[in-house]
Image: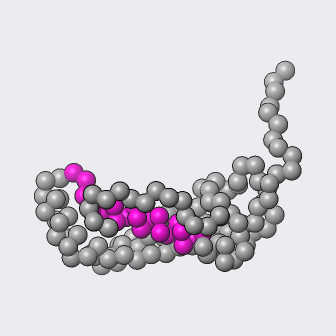
Amino acid sequence: MPAGNPLPTSAPATNVITVTTPYVPGYRIVRVLGATWGLIVRSRGLGRNITAGFRSLGGGEITEYTQLLDQTRHQALERLQQHAAALGGNAVIGMGFDSSEIGDIMSEILCYGTAVVVEPEPNPAQPVALR
């Protein structure tokens, strides 16, 4: 992605609900399918390394790397949701990200969670009233 272009802000193509919590508000979990993940390893590339190297001399944010990692997280999330759907899930709970470097030129981004099947809660939660 060329520097200066906005990052994609559209939602992933799947209809898999994805939350960081261990539950989905308004739904109940009817089946736990197991671990699901989306993994991407990206090279920063020679051009970005050179540009970022010059930019780092002045300090501050390295926008080339920020854009690359943000785009990569979006792609890892899409892969997580596609994997969950392939397992038969319609939701992912406990979603999180992990990252590491391989050598000095590659970044690994892992998006992980638990694939589940959820259905709308038949009895909506009632507000708590203190008397």
Q: Is residue 99 visible?
A: no
Snapshot quadrant of residue 105: bottom left
Task: Indicate left or right for 33 with 54 as reference.
Answer: right
Question: Is residue 76 magenta-colored?
Answer: yes
Residue 57 x %, y %: 12, 58
Task: Indicate left or right for 122 with 15 as reference.
Answer: right
Residue 62 x %, y %: 25, 58
Residue occupying image coordinates x 35% and y 56%: 6
Residue occupying image coordinates x 82% and y 51%: 121
Snapshot quadrant of residue 88: bottom right
Residue at the farthest top position: 131
Residue 14 x %, y %: 61, 67
- In front here: 114 or 76? 76
Snapshot quadrant of residue 11: bottom right
Looking at the rendered structure, the number of numbered marks drawn on it comes to 0
Quarter of the C terminus within the rendering: top right
Residue 104 x %, y %: 27, 75
Q: Is residue 43 visible?
A: yes
| Colour convention of the picture | one colour
Residue occupying image coordinates x 36% and y 72%: 107
Question: Is residue 18 magenta-colored?
Answer: no
Magenta stretch, overall SS: helix
Quarter of the N terminus within the rendering: bottom left
Q: Which residues are magenta?
A: 60-81
Residue occupying image coordinates x 68% and y 63%: 91
